[in-house]
């Protein structure tokens, strides 16, 4: 059996054992740790083939596993390759074509593909273009770097000396290929932060209510702490409280804060799906609520989530988000600001929750915007700001 017949069989085996209940990257790492026969090149190629399979979303599900794997490889490839040469030589000759040309070759219209790949288009937020968003699934997003204040002069020369190509996205933002080992070159979180471009652009939303003041700020769903570090970089004078429902997340966050030079903050495990009392540092001038969501704005990075997505999750998350905001608001000062953030492209989690916050909770909307990142190989997000009168 040739190497590429073996690769196809291994890819199919791995996909058949995965059930979508954990991030596929974690599942794949554990799988390869149990099966030592795979070398580094084998792992890289098989991993790529698996992700190409997931990048088809709900499209081509009527095809056999092997045929769907090969279809994913064909549509995601940018040049001829040995896998297609072995199994689909006529496809391999077209592997470098534009996506529209490949689809024409297969006898499939772009509209048909995008409607089956991402069938939840009726739920999209205004400002998310279905075809452009769905098309982005065929390309892995870039890795974006945010240069921390005072470090601007050192980052670009070090990237150049390491022969790492990068793109500019402003004075403090760069992007590199996902294959680059940035953590081997930089002290991540000290010199720069690995943070998606759209997440960085949330800073433009946060800045007007954070800049230049001594403020008491609560990052109520802190997760990895990216928004907290961003808030601190906007205004190092803030007094910061971070909470999350997961103890291990806060432990990891403390390590990031140490690297980032944030040594004065309060931290607590809190589950905002229920009313909470005794929030350290309350009441607050600003509450940042980067709420749990479908994550649909990030699915080009984690396409397995699209493959396994259940439409009912949209309403479930929207309801949870409303509950979290309701339980956080008693700890916001009068005249204070709520910054509501999702990494979702769904209207129910975004615009409809803005309406709920305005009409049911009585806050004044100051801004509400989709941050569409799919045209620049980034995630898509939603951010809004409210005032408590």
Image (cartoon, helix red, strand yellow):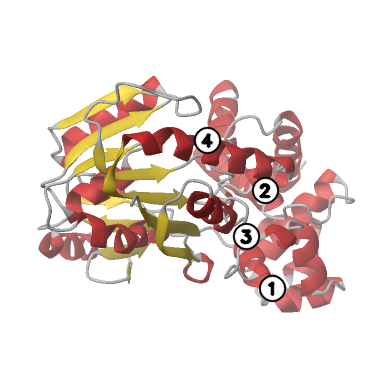
The first of marks 2 and 4 along the sequence is 2
Residue picked out by circle 1:
99
Q: Which mark is residue 137?
A: 3
The first of marks 2 and 1 along the sequence is 1
Q: For the point 24% across and 26% down, which residue is it?
A: 280
Residue 285 in the figure: left or right of residue 46: left
Residue picked out by circle 4:
323
Instruction: Name the secondary structure under disc 2.
Output: helix
Number of the front mark, 3 or 2: 2
Q: For the point 30% across and 57% down, which residue is it?
A: 206
Do tag 2 and tag 4 residues touch (Cβ < 8 Å)? no
Count of numbered circles on the image: 4
Instruction: Name the secondary structure under disc 4.
Output: helix
Do tag 3 and tag 2 residues touch (Cβ < 8 Å)? yes
Instruction: Name the secondary structure under disc 1.
Output: helix
Q: Label 2: few (<14), some or many (≥20) within 10 Å?
A: many
Q: Nearer the viewer, residue 152 or 4?
A: 152
Picture quadrant of residue 31: top right
The first of marks 1 and 4 along the sequence is 1
| Inter-mark Cα distance, 1 to 4 | 42 Å
Q: For the point 71% across and 31% down, which residue is it?
A: 19
Residue picked out by circle 2:
306
| Inter-mark Cα distance, 2 to 4 | 25 Å
Give the quarter of the figure containing the N terminus.
top right
Instruction: Name the secondary structure under disc 3.
Output: helix
The first of marks 1 and 3 along the sequence is 1
**Residue 371, position in %: x, y?**
46, 64
Q: Label 1: few (<14), some or many (≥20) within 10 Å?
A: some
**Residue 319, position in %: x, y?**
60, 39
The first of marks 3 and 2 along the sequence is 3
| Inter-mark Cα distance, 2 to 1 | 20 Å
| Inter-mark Cα distance, 3 to 2 | 10 Å
């Amino acid at each position: 059996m040739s190497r590429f017949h073996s690769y196809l069989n291994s890819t199919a085996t791995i996909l058949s054992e995965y059930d979508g209940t954990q991030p596929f990257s974690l599942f794949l790492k554990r799988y390869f740790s149990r099966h030592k026969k795979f070398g580094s090149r084998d792992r890289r190629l098989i991993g790529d083939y698996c992700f190409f399979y997931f990048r088809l979303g709900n499209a081509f599900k009527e095809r056999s596993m092997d045929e769907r794997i090969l279809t994913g490889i064909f549509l995601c490839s940018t040049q001829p390759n040995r896998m297609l040469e072995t199994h689909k030589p006529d496809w391999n000759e077209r592997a470098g074509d534009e996506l529209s040309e490949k689809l024409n070759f297969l006898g499939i219209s772009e509209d048909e593909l995008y409607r089956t790949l991402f069938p939840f288009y009726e739920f999209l937020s205004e400002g998310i273009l279905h075809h452009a968003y769905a098309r982005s699934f065929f390309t892995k997003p870039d890795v974006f770097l945010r240069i921390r204040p005072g470090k601007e002069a050192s980052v670009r020369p070090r990237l150049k000396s390491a022969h790492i190509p990068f793109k500019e996205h402003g004075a403090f933002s760069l992007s590199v290929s996902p294959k680059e080992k940035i953590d081997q070159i930089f002290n991540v979180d000290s010199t720069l932060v690995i943070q998606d471009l759209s997440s960085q652009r949330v800073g433009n939303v946060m800045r007007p209510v954070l800049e230049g003041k001594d403020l008491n700020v609560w990052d109520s769903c802190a997760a990895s702490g990216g928004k907290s570090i961003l808030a601190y970089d906007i205004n190092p004078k803030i007094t910061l409280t971070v909470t999350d429902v997961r103890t291990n997340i806060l432990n990891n966050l403390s390590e990031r804060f140490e690297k980032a030079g944030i040594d004065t903050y309060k931290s607590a495990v809190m589950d905002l799906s229920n009313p909470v009392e005794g929030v350290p540092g309350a009441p607050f001038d600003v509450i940042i609520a980067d709420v749990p969501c479908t994550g649909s704005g990030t699915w080009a990075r984690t396409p397995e989530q699209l493959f396994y997505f259940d439409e009912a999750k949209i309403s479930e998350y929207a309801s949870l988000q409303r509950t979290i905001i309701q339980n956080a608001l008693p700890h916001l000062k009068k005249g204070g600001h709520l910054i509501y953030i999702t990494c979702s492209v769904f209207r129910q989690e975004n615009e409809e929750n803005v309406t709920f916050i305005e009409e049911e909770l009585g806050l004044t909307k100051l801004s509400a915007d989709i941050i569409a990142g799919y045209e620049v190989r980034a995630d898509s997000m939603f951010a809004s700001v409210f005032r408590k009168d």
